């Protein structure tokens, strides 16, 4: 892991409380790539204890893209967004620590890939998909993206474009329920992946979302033949199950 300086290029409101942040890294004396597809970083914001976000851009991209959900109820996220807006206005550099996370790809595997994302977990999957699009990957690629309401699916047009281009299978899952703790939307997302009738013995899975969703997905897919060592999620690192 290293700490680099980045300029905030732009802040774009996507929908609701979801924002797209574009950072321009100072690459003087820094070797590329800075990260592997699927990894995350930490924004070092004064006064904020954490600031961990999945990287939404591919390692080959000249910029670093983040997707940040910043509702008023999340004080850390709103504080980070306010700081980023100040940096954008002033033109001052932002300190960024990266790369973080083992749930990532640095080569095109000879396996099918299933991506399961909830909410802004789509960011991690976007990085992986764009990396694979520029690689020698020729296996099946599927994306299952679940959100609470249809308006939360802030980049649906991007995923649908990928599907129209024949680059992946995309399934959108909307729970139409504003209660983030309602477990039904987890079940619907996992059920959609199961109904895809994948050959789980020849598949690797990346899951991004709450610990409840991630472990529910693991528990549902293992009996279908998915090897545990082909299930990847940052949750397995920061929220391991008690043994």
Image (cartoon, rainbow, N blue to C red):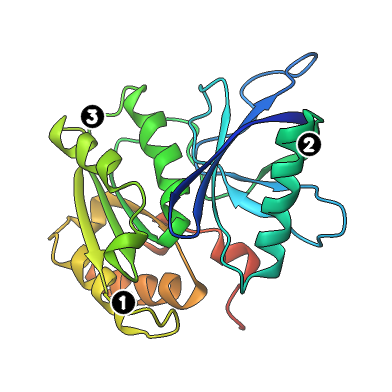
Q: Which mark is residue 101?
A: none
Residue drawn where x is 67% and y is 52% of the image: 81
> In the rendered image, which quarter is residue 31 located in?
top right
Crowding at label 3, few (<14), some or many (≥20) Cα neighbours within 10 Å? some
CA distance separating discs 1 and 3:
31 Å
The image shows residue 243, relative to residue 106, as above or below, that is: below
Residue 177 against residue 233 in the figure, above or below: below
Foreground tag (1 vs 3): 1
Identify the secondary structure beneath mark 3. Answer: loop
The residue wearing badge 2 is 94
Which element is circle 2 on?
Answer: strand
**Tag 1 or tag 2, which sits nearer the N-term?**
2
Tag shown at residue 138: 3
| Sooner in the amino-acid sequence: mark 3 or mark 2 | 2
Disc 1 target residue: 185
Does 142 sit above or below residue 9? below
Residue 45 image point, x, y percent: 81, 50
Extreme top residue here? Answer: 28
């Amino acid at each position: 892991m290293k700490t680099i300086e980045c300029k905030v290029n732009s802040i774009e409101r996507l929908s609701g409380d979801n924002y797209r942040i574009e950072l321009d890294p100072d690459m003087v004396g820094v070797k590329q790539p800075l990260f592997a597809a699927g990894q995350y970083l930490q924004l070092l914001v004064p006064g904020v204890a954490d600031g961990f976000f999945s990287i939404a851009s591919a390692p080959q991209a000249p910029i670093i893209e983040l997707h940040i959900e910043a509702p008023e109820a999340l004080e850390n996220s709103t504080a980070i967004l306010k700081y980023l807006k100040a940096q954008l206005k002033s033109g001052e550099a932002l300190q960024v620590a990266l790369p973080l996370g083992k749930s990532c790809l640095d080569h095109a595997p000879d396996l099918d890939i299933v991506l399961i994302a909830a909410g802004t977990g789509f960011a991690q999957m976007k990085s992986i998909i764009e990396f694979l699009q520029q690689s020698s990957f020729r296996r099946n690629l599927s994306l299952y993206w679940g959100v609470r309401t249809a308006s939360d699916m802030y980049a649906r047009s991007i995923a649908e474009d990928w599907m129209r281009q024949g680059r992946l299978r995309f399934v959108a899952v909307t729970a139409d329920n504003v209660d983030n703790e309602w477990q039904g939307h987890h079940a619907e997302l996992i059920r959609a992946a199961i109904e895809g009738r994948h050959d789980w013995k020849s598949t690797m899975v990346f899951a991004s979302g709450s610990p409840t969703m991630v472990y529910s997905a693991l528990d549902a897919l293992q009996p279908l033949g998915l090897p545990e060592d082909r299930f990847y999620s940052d949750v397995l690192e920061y929220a391991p199950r008690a043994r």
